Amino acid sequence: MATSKLQALWNHPAGPKTIHFWAPTFKWGISIANIADFQKPPETLSYPQQFVITGTGLIWSRYSTVITPKNWNLFSVSLGMAATGIYQLTRKIKHDYASEADPTVAKE
């Protein structure tokens, strides 16, 4: 029984022999690295990097529901990438612009 399930996974259109399987795996690594960056100070974040993470997350979350077969793993990791990118951009924008306008924040 386990052999037939393994063979079915191996021969599935979105199985390990295709990019549909591996692309989300690498994107999970990027998402986890971006989550680890939540501890970094906002001044060390990069606008271009976070825009790319957010953009690819939004684009691929849409595209993953259009391709056949639908790739729900790609969809979920892309939503995660978009969410972490938006959060990091929000942190960076607040740090760069909101703190300058706030007179209660001490200037260095």
Image (spheres, grey):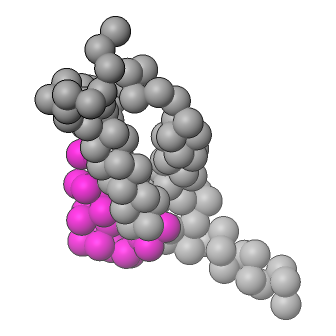
Q: Is residue 16 above or below residue 33?
A: below
Check the image and name the residue furthest to the front.
Answer: 104
Which image quarter is the C terminus in?
Answer: top left
> In x, y percent, where is residue 2?
84, 83
Examine the rendering and report whether any part of residue 74 can be seen.
Answer: no
Residue 62 lies in the magenta stretch: yes
Residue at (37, 75) in percent of width and height: 70
Residue at (37, 62) in percent of width and height: 79
Total marks drawn? 0
Check the image and name the residue furthest to the top.
Answer: 108
* 66 left or right, relative to 31: left
For the residue pair 20 and 98, the one nearer the viewer reads as 98
For the residue pair 36 and 20, the one nearer the viewer reads as 36
* 48 left or right, relative to 29: left
Residue at (57, 66) in percent of width and height: 15
Secondary structure of the magenta portion, mostly?
helix
Q: Is residue 64 above or below residue 56?
A: below
The image quarter containing residue 68 is bottom left
Q: Is residue 9 above or below residue 81?
A: below
> In x, y percent, where is residue 69?
38, 75
Residue 22 lies in the magenta stretch: no
> In x, y percent, where is residue 102?
20, 32
For the residue pair 53 and 18, the one nearer the viewer reads as 53
Examine the rendering and report whether any part of residue 90 can be seen.
Answer: yes
Residue at (66, 68) in percent of width and height: 10
Q: From which residue to which does the magenta span run?
A: 52-74
* 102 left or right, relative to 22: left
> In x, y percent, where is residue 76?
44, 67
Check the image and name the residue furthest to the bottom.
Answer: 1
Which image quarter is the N terminus in?
Answer: bottom right
